[in-house]
């Protein structure tokens, strides 16, 4: 008799875009952080410019902006769909004709 473990096929491993995007963002943020730390370490602390610190922070924040924009857009779409869904009771009221 065949073993039941052999009869059930394992699901195919797939690579999804969300996982790849997440890890790409993490690697990019670490890369920018390490370069900035190395740059600041090599320089005299009094020679570090405010613009360098701000730009490194903006670059790290920019790595994650696609995620935040996607979350905001999903929420806007959900709100819009729920507001104007026919069964939600939202949106303009249907015209009612009174017969005489």
Image: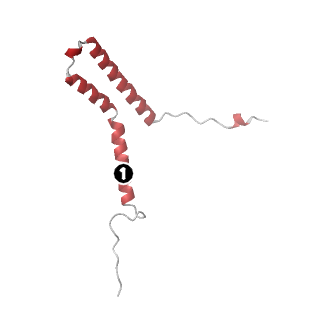
- Taking depth in this image into account, of 87 and 37 the one nearest to the observer is 37
Residue furthest bottom as drawn: 100
- The residue depicted at 34 percent of the width and 34 percent of the height is 64
Vertical comparison of 48 with 59: above or below: above
Give the labeled residue for mark 1.
77
**Which quarter of the rendered picture does the C terminus lie within?**
bottom left
Observer-nearest of 64 and 17: 64
Image position, residue 97 (x, y; %): 34, 79
Residue 71 lies left or right of residue 11; in this view the side is: left
In the displayed structure image, the side of residue 100 where residue 12 appears, left or right: right
Residue lying at 65% horizontally and 36% vertically, measured from the top left = 9
- Location of residue 20 in the rendering, given as x and y in whole percent from the top left corner: 43, 31
At a point 34% along the width and 69% down the height, the residue shown is 93
Q: Position of residue 11 (x, y in %)?
A: 59, 36
Colouring chosen for the image of the structure? secondary structure
Q: Residues within 10 Å of mark 1 (few under 14, many from 20)?
A: few
Which SS class for mark 1? helix
**Residue located at (39% from left, 61% from top):** 85
4 lies above or below 50: below
Q: Is residue 65 left or right of residue 3?
A: left
Image check: 99 left or right of 3? left
In the displayed structure, 1 sits above or below 73; it is above
Name the spot of residue 1 as percent of width and height, x first: 79, 36
């Amino acid at each position: 008799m065949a073993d039941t473990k052999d009869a059930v096929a394992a699901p195919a491993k797939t690579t999804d875009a969300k996982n790849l995007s997440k890890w790409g963002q993490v690697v990019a943020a670490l890369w920018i952080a390490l370069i900035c730390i190395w740059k600041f370490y090599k320089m005299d602390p009094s020679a570090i410019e405010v613009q360098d610190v701000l730009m490194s922070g903006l670059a790290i924040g920019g790595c994650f902006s696609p995620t935040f924009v996607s979350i905001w857009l999903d929420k806007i779409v959900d709100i819009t769909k729920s507001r104007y869904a026919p069964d939600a009771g939202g949106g303009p009221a249907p015209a009612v004709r009174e017969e005489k």
